[in-house]
Image (spheres, rainbow, N blue to C red):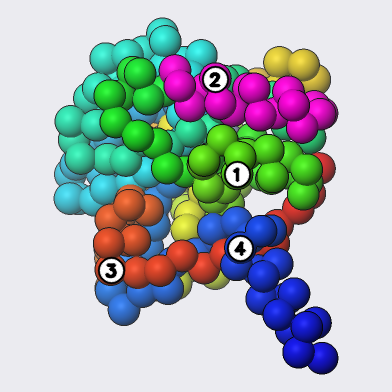
Amino acid sequence: MRSVLRAAVRAGTTWAGSVRAVRTEEAHAVLTFDDGPDPVGTERVLSALAARGASATFFVLTERVGKYRTLLAETVAEGHEIALHGLDHSRLTRFGAREVGTRVATARRVLEDALGTPVRWFRPPYGAQTPTTWRAVRRTGLEPVLWGPTAWDWLDEPVPVLAARAMEGMKRGAILLAHDGYGDDPGDPSGAPAPTFDRGALASAVLDALAERGLRGVSLEAAMRTGTAERWAWFRR
Ligand SMILES: [Zn+2]
């Protein structure tokens, strides 16, 4: 019995766990924005965050970092955290362990060269990972981060609908998935058009709804200064 329990604890915390929330005494909700930098979306999200004194973690694609270096620098200058989403938006579960390791390690190097500082977190596109890809990512030294609530903002819907969805299951220490850009898998494209709603308006609506619940939007780095990561297994293709 004891060995079974130990295995379960190990699965949840060490070798199979991904960060999905933060245990914290602070009135913090973690804001994450994926798929940028984006010349329209990132600017709007940055303005919304600045207007409300919030910070966030941006999971970026390095092929876009190359195109929009100024936007990346602006995001850092405004006090936000940069993390890695990938070279591009490929679903990593399509690749073997070696290719996943090479892609993630290369992307990490490119991003750290652009930033001049180390990167800590990685979010697999689509949240798609298997124990094999998870291990390959961990071997690069990065830590997988998934999410709790999400705005489902890859769909083009009215901002109040998306904001209400983002707030479902929202609580202290929750990690919200939202987007400042739009990603598609270059090797298996959905072909769906990028949404056209105002991503800054969505960020503002979410921040206002958080404030009504007494919660402040912060980056993962900021939440982890006084909190601890909650990790549990998350695998899906
Ligand atoms: Zn993405």
Badge 1 density bin: few <14, some 14–19, many ≥20, Cα 10 Å:
some
Disc 4 to disc 1, C-alpha distance: 10 Å
Q: Which quadrant of the frame does ligand 1 lie within?
A: top right
Residue picked out by circle 3: 226
Q: Which mark is residue 14?
A: 4
Res 204 seen here: no
Element on which disc 4 rests:
loop
Residue 204 placement (x, y as % from top left): 32, 47
Look at discs 3 and 4 and give the one toward the viewer: 4
Tell me which amino acid carries mark 1: Arg
State if disc 1 and disc 4 touch (CB < 8 Å): no
Asked whether residue 1 is drawn in magenta, I would say no
Q: Quadrant of the N terminus?
A: bottom right
Tell me which amino acid carries mark 2: Thr
Q: Is residue 82 above or below residue 62?
A: below
Disc 3 to disc 4, C-alpha distance: 20 Å
Tell me which amino acid carries mark 3: Thr
Element on which disc 3 rests:
helix
Residue at 33% across, 46% down: 56
Residue 178 placement (x, y as % from top left): 49, 44
Residue in the foreground of this view, choosing between 52 and 133: 133
Disc 4 to disc 2, C-alpha distance: 24 Å
Marks 2 and 3, the one that precedes in the sequence:
2
Marks 4 and 1, the one that precedes in the sequence:
4
Please give left or right for residue 22 compared with residue 91 in the image.
left
Residue picked out by circle 1: 138
Judged by its main secondary structure, the magenta piece is: helix
Res 222 seen here: yes
